[in-house]
Image (spheres, rainbow, N blue to C red):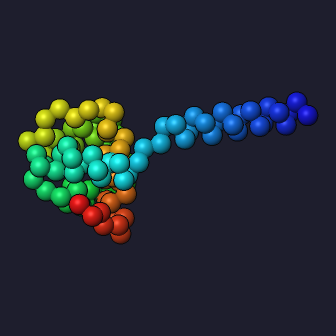
Amino acid sequence: MKLLKLVFVGALALGISSTGALANADKGQKLFVKKLKEECGMTGAKVAGKHTQAQWEKIGNGAGLEKEIKTICPKVGDIDDKFLEHYYDFFYKFASDSGNVPSC
């Protein structure tokens, strides 16, 4: 019975911690349109299509992603760190090899 409780508590803790940290590709798309599209001078589809999903994974969703955004879009100014995970999910979901096409 103790083992069952321990397993349940562990599963519950894992579930809570992982759902709280989820980013959102749809939110990333909205943020891209609102905050980056004009300065970038291209659609989100073109930016996301610059790399495959594996390449976006390698870039990651931290400082590497911010650097890559500024490389692709040199006119982009400061990027709020709290949005990076959403941008990453958007770029990953609509990467060149994903088969997905965003509406922006």
Place of residue 52 in the rendered image (x, y in percent of width and height, measured from the top left): 32, 58
Which image quadrant is residue 70 in?
top left
Looking at the picture, does residue 73 appear above or below residue 101?
Answer: above
Q: Is residue 71 above or below residue 41?
A: above
In the picture, which quadrant includes the C terminus? bottom left
Residue that appears at 18% across and 45% down:
36
Q: Classify residue 76 by image quadrant.
A: top left
**In the rendered image, which quarter is residue 94 located in?**
bottom left
Residue 88 visible in image: no
Residue shown at 35%/69% (left/top)?
A: 99
Residue 36 shown left or right of residue 101 in the figure: left
Residue sitting at 26 percent across and 32 percent down?
A: 80
Q: Is residue 8 visible?
A: yes
Looking at the image, the residue that sits furthest to the right is 1
Left or right placement of residue 44 versus residue 100 in this view: left
Q: Is residue 21 left or right of residue 87?
A: right
Q: Residue at x 66, y 33 (%)?
A: 13
Quadrant assignment for the N terminus: top right
